[in-house]
Amino acid sequence: MTSPLQERLPAIMDRTNHRACATVDAASSLDAALALASTLHTPGQRERYRRLLERAIEQADHALAAAEQERAALQEPEFAAGSERILATRMDACSTLARAHAARAEDALHGAGQLSLSAQRAPTREACDDGWRRVEEIVAGAEASARAAAISAAEIEAGSPRSKVARAARAAAHKAEVAARAARRIIEERNHAYTFHTDSGFSFGEGWYVAGAAVLAGAAIQVEPGKAGTPQAEAFLRDAGLSDHLQAYRSRPRAVKQTTEIVARAFKAGPSSAQRRLRAAFLGDVPIPESVTGWVDRRLAEAPAGKSCRKKVLLWIREGLHHPHRNTTLAELLELTELARHTGLVPVLTGDALPDGQVPEGAVDMTLFWKDPTFRQLDMRRAQLQFFEHLRRTHGLVGQLGVTTAGMDGPALMGLPTMYLTDTPNVRMREWVGAVPGYQEVVRESGYLERVRRVLSEWAAAS
């Protein structure tokens, strides 16, 4: 007749074998993962690395669970030797867990850093915030791994405080803690500001978006430091009443692309109110200085076509290194000039230099006006907007037309009817179509010039 102890022995042996196999498998999975550490930059390797780490943690957790069940079963003195083996298993499993969680915390730090960069570059606020929510989840995972590594290290120390295994577990737990803290700092140091670029390599017109987002939605701004245009940008923002929105420059700002959507949202909520607020901030309540009005008046008086009191339209010219396929072509400029003249409008050329240096017949050349010393002083940002405002108030400017260029968007926000030409729909700027009054997108498709003609005719007929 068998004893109760003999009856339980097969089940106990099964758990022992299961626990031993799980412990060995966990260590093997971890070793396989760590062997990939030098190749994580190659495609697919980091995902494989993460799967192996997760497998090692899962297997080690199973080994601990099996050891706990086995220890509960081995209460009789006859199983004292078995208890010692269980303790050894627990130490091995905890060692694997400490090292695996340390590796996972460091991997989470890497992932949080990479994702935070892409989140900041997201084109909309929603996409940006969604990316940062995922960063927060990754950081929470790093912190969970740091806690798990610390628990495993503490258990080893309790059983064998001076052993080599304990020292290795303590070191692993410390690495996990360092990685988790660094990951949390990524969240804490998130930069909510938009950069007002003053480097000539960036579009001058993007400053209108950034300042507009601050005026209409309270967005934080940082000015690119140490550039030739830095003092002028800071002066413009102060004059616009945005001093409280300025912060010290630091890395990882939000993507400026988000600001067009912010501006659009404010205009959709109340177009008249948004436009009034921007005009008050950007133009102020002081008269346009004589230096600006005199410069414009003289240039018009000197041009044969400019002496006319007829209504005028701005034709923008773009000539840039960024996306050169978007630059103005001479053929299209001549077509637009003729369309403007045939609808009774005087075309005023502005923006970059003429494609061939020759002013089309009947047009007024005000290209490169922004390079004149009048518009390069400390108040250059406001002075350039005043240039357009004076043309509108005094010289019958009724609208503007040209290829997609951010230079047009300052006057557009001030209320100047605008048509921008593009080969394909512009996802970012279409946010303003139907939101900013008078702002239209014209895709170069069949019949687009006829559409341009119709709008020009409407502008010419407007009172």
Image (spheres, rainbow, N blue to C red):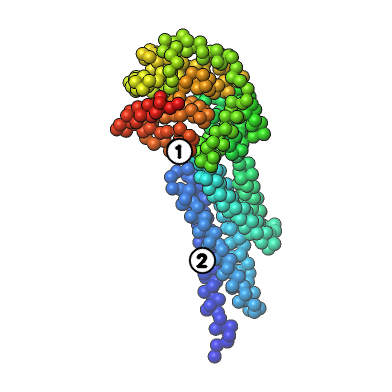
Residue 155 lies, with reference to residue 41, above or below; the image says below
Counting from the top left corner in percent of width and height, residue 432 is at: 47, 36
Which residue is more in the foreground, 43 or 291?
291
Res 209 visible: yes
**Which secondary structure lies at badge 2?**
helix
Instruction: Give the residue at mark 2.
Output: 21
**Which secondary structure lies at badge 1?**
loop
Counting from the top left corner in percent of width and height, residue 41 is at: 47, 43
Which residue is more in the foreground, 128 or 421?
421
| Dot 2 amino acid type | Cys
Tell me: 134 left or right of 78.
left
Tell me the tag on residue 434: 1
Residue 79 lies, with reference to residue 277, above or below; the image says below
Disc 2 to disc 1: CB gap under 8 Å: no
- Residue sitting at x 57%, y 29%: 279
| Quarter placement of the N terminus | bottom right
* Neighbourhood count class around disc 2 (C-alpha, 10 Å): few under 14, some 14–19, many 20 upward: few
Q: Nearer the viewer, mark 2 or mark 1?
A: 1
Residue 290 lies, with reference to residue 94, above or below; the image says above
- Residue sitting at x 60%, y 76%: 73
